[in-house]
Image (cartoon, grey):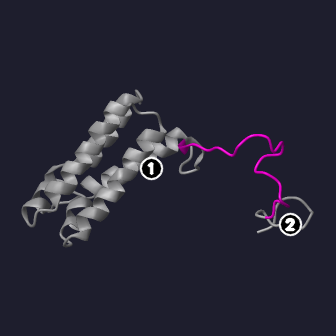
Amino acid sequence: MENDGDDGRDDWDDGGADWNDEGSEQFEWSLEDVPLSGDAEATLERIEWLGELLDEAVPVPGTDYRVGLDPILGILPVGGDAVAALISLYIVGEAARMGVSKSKLALMISLVAVDAVVGSIPVLGTVFDAVWKANKWNVGLLKRELDV
């Protein structure tokens, strides 16, 4: 991949220079610098969609109840609940990036942990996953924290 200049060097060839132009400061980064998401509105839309997908994407025929991919993934032995938990942690990560308080983040993580631990119990865990809506609750916590 070429840089925008006409010097023919690729982006990784810095010619021995430091990361910055002055060369006097250390290269530093923080989580806020990592381009994981767009603006706040797009982030909220994305995590609302993900929360709905994990907790309420599929209507249960003959009822007004909905389940998501979380209990469906939970049917898979061992790895299904781990995958669902990792996807659920994306919502928590975005909440952290948006500035949610540490106490709310701890609550959000505990909701995901309960979901993962109890959800991993064969049969009972799948039923629990269908009722325990940790992702929906986490999206609600985020929105209340941000007054959205």
Which of labels 1 and 2 is toward the front? Answer: 2
- The kind of residue tagged 1 is Arg
Name the spot of residue 43 as percent of width and height, x first: 48, 45
Side of 112 relative to 45 (left or right): left
- The disc, 1 or 2, on the residue closer to the chain's N-terminal end is 2
Name the spot of residue 91 as percent of width and height, x first: 38, 48
Residue labelled with disc 1: 46
Between residues 22 and 90, which one lies in front from this camera angle? 22
Between residues 134 and 60, which one lies in front from this camera angle? 134
Mark 1 neighbour class, 10 Å CA radius: few under 14, some 14 to 19, many 20 or more: some
- Please name the residue shown 26% across and 41% down the image: 137
Instruction: Determine the residue located farthest toward the bottom in the rendered image.
Output: 77
Between residues 63 and 70, which one lies in front from this camera angle? 70
Q: Quadrant of the C terminus?
A: top left
Name the spot of residue 33 as percent of width and height, x first: 60, 44
- The kind of residue tagged 2 is Arg
Side of 85 relative to 4 (left or right): left
Name the spot of residue 99 as percent of width and height, x first: 46, 33
- Please name the residue shown 78% across and 62% down the image: 11
State which region is magenta.
13-31
Circle 2 — which element? loop
* Residue 129 seen in this snapshot: no
- Please name the residue shown 41% across and 40% down the image: 95
Taking the magenta stretch, the answer to whether it contains residue 129 is: no
* Residue 5 seen in this snapshot: yes
Q: Which mark is residue 9?
A: 2
Taking the magenta stretch, the answer to whether it contains residue 16 is: yes
Instruction: Determine the residue located farthest toward the top in the rendered image.
Output: 147
Q: Quadrant of the N terminus?
A: bottom right
